[in-house]
Image: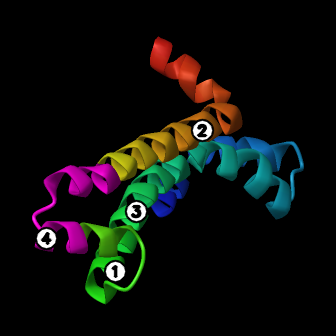
């Protein structure tokens, strides 16, 4: 949905300008539409990373065979609060690291967006 919204917000004047200068459909897509939609795409990726982490842990909790979800179920059932918080803290740190990695990727792929935020 974010990608769709990003593509829809591309200014028609930018596309028309590309056509005036003789750009084909491929060049318009790669040089105008994708860079303009990139901040929206990266916002979708940031949301997806968090939801994927939650989905993985939830699935592991239901299967409860191995993984962090199984550890959470096992330790919560045994009332081992000290051991329960180890995977919780690890998952929180993993979420922060993945979010930071996506932010770094966004800064690398769309450096102009950072200058827009500074203004």
Question: Residue under circle 1?
Answer: 59
- Cα separation between marks 4 and 3: 24 Å
Q: Secondary structure at mark 3?
A: helix
User: From this viewpoint, is residue 78 visible?
Assistant: yes
Q: Residue at x 57, y 17 (%)?
A: 115
User: In this figure, which residue is indicated by the disc labeled 2?
Assistant: 106
Residue on which disc 3 sits: 53
Q: Residue at x 28, y 53 (%)?
A: 88
**Mark 2 to mark 1 CA distance (whole Å):** 29 Å
- In front: 65, or 2? 65
Residue 40 drawn above or below residue 65: above
Q: Quadrant of residue 60?
A: bottom left
Residue 64 position in % (x across, y down): 31, 84
How far apart marks 4 and 1 lie (CA) works out to 20 Å
* Magenta residues, dominant SS class: helix
Do the CB atoms of the residues marked 4 and 1 lie less than 8 Å apart?
no
């Amino acid at each position: 949905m974010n990608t769709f919204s990003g593509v829809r917000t591309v200014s028609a004047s930018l596309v028309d300008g590309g056509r005036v200068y003789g750009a084909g459909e491929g060049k318009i897509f790669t040089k105008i539409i994708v860079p303009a939609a990139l901040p929206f795409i990266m916002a979708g990726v940031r949301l997806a990373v968090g939801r994927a982490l939650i989905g993985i842990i939830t699935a592991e909790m239901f299967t409860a065979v191995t993984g962090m979800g199984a550890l959470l179920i096992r330790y919560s059932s045994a009332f081992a609060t000290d051991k329960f918080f180890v995977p919780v803290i690890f998952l929180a740190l993993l979420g922060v690291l993945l979010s930071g990695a996506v932010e770094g990727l966004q800064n690398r792929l769309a450096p102009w967006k950072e200058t827009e935020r500074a203004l």
